[in-house]
Structures are given as C-alpha cells and as structure tokens.
Amino acid sequence: MSNHLPAALIASLEGLPGFDRAPFEQVHAAAEKITSLRFNPLKVRTAETQENILSALSASDAVQIPWSSAGYYLSQRPSFTFDPYFHAGAYYVQEASSMFLEHAVRTTVDLSRPLKVLDLCAAPGGKSTLLQSLLNEQSMLVANEVIKPRAALLADNLSKWGAANVVVSNNDPRDFSRLPGYFDLIVIDAPCSGSGLFRRDPELIPEWSPENVELCSQRQQRILADVLPALKEDGILIYSTCSFSKEEDEVILDWLADHFELENIALNVPSAWQIVPTVTDKRNCTGYRFYPNRLKGEGFFISCFRKRDMAHTAKRKETKQGVVSAKERELLSSWIQLPDGYSYLPHQDEMLILSPLVATEIAFLQQQLYIRKAGVKAGQPGKKELIPDHQLAMSPMVAAEVPVVDLELKAALQYLRKEDPGIDTPVRGWALMRYGQMPLGWAKILPNRINNYYPKELRILKDISGL
Ligand code: SAM
C-alpha cells in the first residue's frame, strides 16, 4: 500500500502551526509502526506484575510515554493474540498520542470528587478505559457508542477492563438532551476524516477528500450541539480528533466559542513533549496538534473548554429497585468480595454488581438511554448455585476463597481457544482459570472432564499448534 498523501491534503495543511512538509511526508513514507500499550491499574498493581507482562511480551526494554502514567512504547509489535494477559484485560493496546487525554483530564478536572463522565463516541474503548483508570470509585463513566455492533465491542472491552463504575449505552448524541446539566466531564473523540492515522493505516488514504473533511466538520458541529446541554455548569468539555484538517480542529473551536458559553482552557504542556499549541484566528482558543514527525505517536488534536452558562437539570422520577433476598446474598457472598458501598441489582434472571454512583443513577439512566451494560454482571443465581458470568471473572471482586487453577502458557491458550486445557488438578467444581495470577475466565471441573465457560464469541480463533 502506497503512503502517498493526497496533494490536496498537503496543500490544506501548509501554514498550520507546526506543519513542516518535508519531514511530514518523510515520516509517512518511512511508515514506521509504533506500538504502545497502557496498563490497567485495577489488575496490574505492582511493578513486578508489570515487569512480568512486559517480559512475556519480550518487551522488557519498554519506555514510558511522557504524558501517560501507565502507557509504554514497545520496541516491536508482539502477537497480542497469543498473550493471555491481553485477554485478561491487563492492558489496552492504544496509540500513544491519544493517551494525552490523561494530561488534559488531570489538569482540568478535580479527580478527587465523585464525577459523572460521558465518553460520547467511545468504541472501541481506548479513551473509555483510560478515563475509567483516572476516576475514583465514587465516580461513574457512561461510555456511549451510536453504532450497534461497535457498542457491543465497546461493552466487551469494558467488561474485560473489569470496573463496576461503568455504564455502556448505545445512543445517538441527540438522546443526551434528555439529561440536561448531568455530566461533569464530556469527552468527544469525534468521528473524523482520519488523516492522523494515515501513517499507521495507509489503506485509509484513498477515502480522504476535501468534501469528506467538510462533511466531518458539519457532523462534528451537530454532535457537539446535540450533547452540550448535557454538560453541567462549570463542567469540562474535551474535544479531540485524529485529523490534521483545520476544518475539524481550529474551525470547530471557533465555532464552539461563537455558539456556546464556553471558556477555552489552555494546558500546561512541557515543550520537550513536542506537542504543538495552536491558537485559533477568531476566538483565541488553544488546541494541541500532534505530528508523527515531531513526536512518537500518530496525528491527533485536542482542546478543552469549561461551560459557562446555566445548565438546566432533569426532573427525576423515583423508581424502585429489585430486592436481593437473604438467600441470594449468602450465595453471592461465597463468590464475591463486595467493596464498601457497592451493591447488587437483580436484572432479569441475573445479578449485577454496581458501584455506589451507578447504583443511584442506573434507573434514571435506563429511562433515558438504551443501556447495554451496567456495572459488572455477577451471574445467574440458581436454587443451589450461582452460574458465574465472565464479567465477574474479569473484575477484581472475585472472593479469595473461590478455587483457582493456574495454567501454563500453552494450557492458558488452549483454555482461551475454548478447548480442554488438559490439566491435572485436584480442584473440583467451579474454578477461576488464571495465567500468571491473572484471571482468564471460568471452568467447571468434573471428575472426567472440564467444562470450559470461556465466552464463545471471545475465543482465540488462530491456530496455536506452532507455538
Ligand atoms: N474514542 C474511541 C477510542 O478511543 O477507542 C474512538 C472513537 S472514533 C474516533 C469515533 C466514534 O464515533 C466511532 O466509534 C464511530 O462509530 C462514532 N460515530 C460515528 N458517527 C457518529 C455520530 N454521528 N455521532 C456519534 N458518534 C459517531
């Protein structure tokens, strides 16, 4: 695939802050692949675990990404599919520039407060998993995606991440007008013309056109106008794209400042990071440009605002939650170490584990949005036993007394292929299958066979016989 950039794109970038044609074209022609990942602090709690994971990826020489507390560059791209830690949700493979969202959030938001956060364009979940890692347990993240199959992928990735303070919704941005003045922080990682990813994904280049840039710019305005009423007074809006085009970046900032009571926020960005500040012509708004020829990451743009006008708040109808019986509670207690303030919610024939804010908000959110996932699904309580859900295995809430079986690499991959991992163990009944102390999923061990409960739709399809 040729990395030849459209002449009209290059021409449109001339004169933009930080744009330098020759090195920009060279870095696209060189097509270097940069690999980076971000650890999950819910699961990777010690430097030793982090080192074990990097060593399993043959990446002990990984280098920390300057603007990220848990992000690392790897010197080469390993096969993540064959790494059980990847399937365990120990890390998320994410492009480095987008991890700058952490710096933007840390410098604009008081993360010690209980916050309601919306990630509006969230699939597949890179920014959502990052936001979840920044929030405290009293906060709640609503991760939304308008396209249904992408919302399913988002829910899977957030289930793998393991946190109970997350809700996944599948709504059009305009549906959020039903939640006036609700969120403290809204992140809009907008659908865009994608030029920032042309070095990494050259197959996207032929789809680029000036007309598409214009269409994207119009759509970005619609999305912003639709969702802004849902932001609280003094709430923070973070807007980002992976486009270099002014029409999707600076022009949008001016449009926002023209049409809404928003105060632009300039960030303190160390010059050593080689991120280029850009100030808009009309309204002096500051945004940040990421060029692959200047820093180790793909093209990216980000800017932050504070809402200044009065926000209306929604009226709420109180609803009754389902009741958890003493018997169910007892059954659940042998499986789950429920953190302080967390609660159970019966939903259809299943039991959910909700963080405190999700528990108080879920009935209201359900009246307004199409909810795909809330908190962590514990499983199906039956008469005698709980059939545990994969989401519980992925969470850090499994009780210490639940039996575990530690698998070697080959057996772990066989388990993840939904095969019999062929292990010899004295454990009988339900057990948590682990690799390097990290839970992978459930199995029921019978005297003569093992029933593998790894979700069929998540199983590894690639052949592992050559490993
Ligand atoms: N934030 C994601 C991450 O970090 O993994 C990437 C988001 S991607 C840049 C933009 C998302 O917006 C896509 O998932 C796309 O399906 C969604 N999208 C497309 N059209 C949209 C629309 N009209 N309104 C809202 N979202 C839209």
Image (spheres, grey):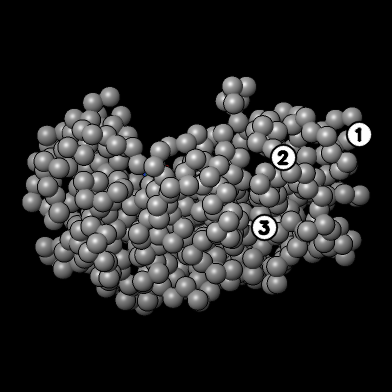
Question: For the image shown, how many numbered marks are present on the structure?
Answer: 3
In the rendered structure, find residue 396 and report the number of the disc placed on it: 3
Mark 2 vs mark 3: give the one in front.
Answer: 2
Label 1 amino acid?
Pro
Label 2 and label 1: CA atoms lie apart by: 18 Å
Q: Residues within 10 Å of mark 2 (few under 14, many from 20)?
A: many
According to the picture, the residue beneath numbered tag 2 turns out to be 407
Q: Where does residue 319 sit, x and y in percent of width and height?
A: 67, 67
Q: Is residue 138 left or right of residue 311?
A: right
**Mark 2 vs 3, N-terminal side:** 3
Q: Is mark 1 within 8 Å of ligand 1?
A: no
Q: Is mark 2 within 8 Å of ligand 1?
A: no
According to the picture, the residue beneath numbered tag 1 turns out to be 447
Q: Where does residue 425 sit, x and y in percent of width and height?
A: 84, 39
Q: In this view, does 425 lie to the left or right of 417?
A: right
Label 2 amino acid?
Leu
Q: Nearer the viewer, residue 311 or 408?
A: 408
Q: Is residue 301 left or right of residue 438?
A: left
Residue at 40 percent across and 59 percent down: it is 68
Q: Which of 257 and 18 is in front in this view?
A: 18
Asked if residue 85 is positioned above or below residue 139 in the image, the reply reads above
Asked if residue 313 is positioned above or below residue 12 in the image, the reply reads below
Task: Find numbered disc 3 in the image and state the secondary structure of the residue it sits on.
Answer: loop
Q: Which of 371 and 34 is in front in this view?
A: 34
Q: Where does residue 315 sit, x and y in percent of width and height?
A: 53, 72
Residue at 44 percent across and 61 percent down: it is 69
Task: Find numbered disc 1 in the image and state the secondary structure of the residue it sits on.
Answer: loop
Q: In which quarter of the image is residue 375?
A: bottom right
Asked if residue 328 is positioned above or below residue 56 in the image, the reply reads below
Query: Quadrant location of the C terminus?
Result: top right
Label 3 amino acid?
Pro
Label 3 and label 1: CA atoms lie apart by: 29 Å
